[in-house]
Image (cartoon, grey):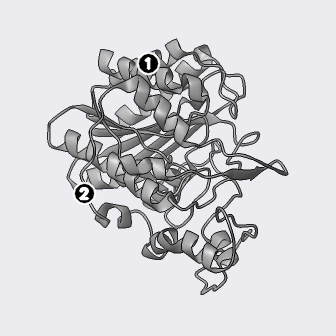
Amino acid sequence: MLTFCSPAQNAHAPLVELVNGQAEAHAETPARLANMLAAMGPMCAPADHGMEAILAVHDADYVAFLQSAHAAWLAAGREGDAIGYAFPVRGRRPLALERIDGRLGQYSFDTVTPIAAGTWEAAYGAAQSALGALEAVASGETRQAFALCRPPGHHAGADYFGGYCYLNNAAIAARAAAARGMGPVAVLDVDYHHGNGTQDIFYADGSVFFASIHADPRTDFPYFWGHAEEHGTDEGEGANLNLPLPRGTGWATYQDALGKALDAVTRFGARTLIVSYGADTFAEDPIAQFALTTDDMHRMGARIGALGLPTVTVMEGGYNVAALGRNVAAFIAGLESA
């Protein structure tokens, strides 16, 4: 399978995250990428497809903020990574804020997603990897391609970042696919956490179907999105499917949810599939609570591959660094076996 990865993705190296009242070493580190690269063999460096596809998903003001935030943080006399501390509970609206502290809160929703010196370069590189994989599928060079995106993307909305995510790689690929006449497009999210940013971006867009299998948000991040009753709105009514599962879920239960999601993708009439793949469903992931094995990753990939659709997979989470490469490799092998 053609796999795409930009060298710039190593530039993002956040130091700490503020979680559960503590400053902890950040879980989303360059070591994740190094482990996957070691396990997966040769990579294709993506071409630079520019900003057009990114701006088709993300607001221009938000993108400009991501590009300038760390410099503004340093200019304010701060050190290290930029992390917000004040967030609007309701009534988010455009505001001409001046202090970097306020602007960080304006464009984010948590304290676990700092903007470091190389964050923009890495996020941009990850988006280019997703676009490179899409180009390979769109051109007919391959039927399946994998984008080894890091940082991940599915928690990022049109104008906000969070959950370690800054640019929504899956949404960028999905909208670019639709623009190229590859629709209807479906996005299937199999990360442990709900892809709230992807849901938000397409919630009123009936041209893109979104299905997510994830930990029940009553107990797990991102809490405020991903509940089963969220079906879409306006033109997107019925084009959003959430399948929340309890902590401790193993393959027997997970495969049933996966079957429901794949059936929904088929009923939608999808001609192109974008997969948000997170290896944090692994039983030994340090920040997740499902019980899938490496063999289950292969089974998951095989079930998805059996749809026979042109497929672009973008990497999301997975924080057991030692096991990450073999889990991703197992998933890809499953995709290819179908």
The amino acid pointed to by label 2 is Ala
Q: Residue at 47% of width from left, 70% of height from top?
A: 67
Answer with left or right where residue 310 lies relative to residue 190: left
Residue 98: x and y in percent read: 63, 86
Q: Position of residue 317 (x, y in %)?
A: 55, 38
Q: Quadrant of residue 124?
A: bottom left
Residue displayed at 69% across by 30% down? 286
The C terminus - image quarter: top left
Picture coordinates of residue 297 (x, y %)? 49, 20
Residue 214 has which mark?
A: none
- In the picture, the disc for residue 330 is 1
Q: Residue at x 60, y 23 (%)?
A: 282
196 or 34: which is nearer to us? Answer: 34
Q: Look at the image and tell me whether residue 270 can be seen.
A: no
- When asked about the image quadrant of residue 227, the answer is top right
Name the element at disc 2. Answer: helix
Q: Is residue 257 above or below residue 234?
A: above
Q: Quadrant of the N terminus?
A: top left
The residue under label 1 is which amino acid type? Ala
**Residue drawn at (37%, 62%) of the image:** 54
In this rendered view, identify the residue nearer to me: 193 or 317.
317
Residue 179 badge: 2
CB under 8 Å between callouts 2 and 1? no
Of the two numbered discs 2 and 1 on the same chain, state the one appearing first in sequence: 2
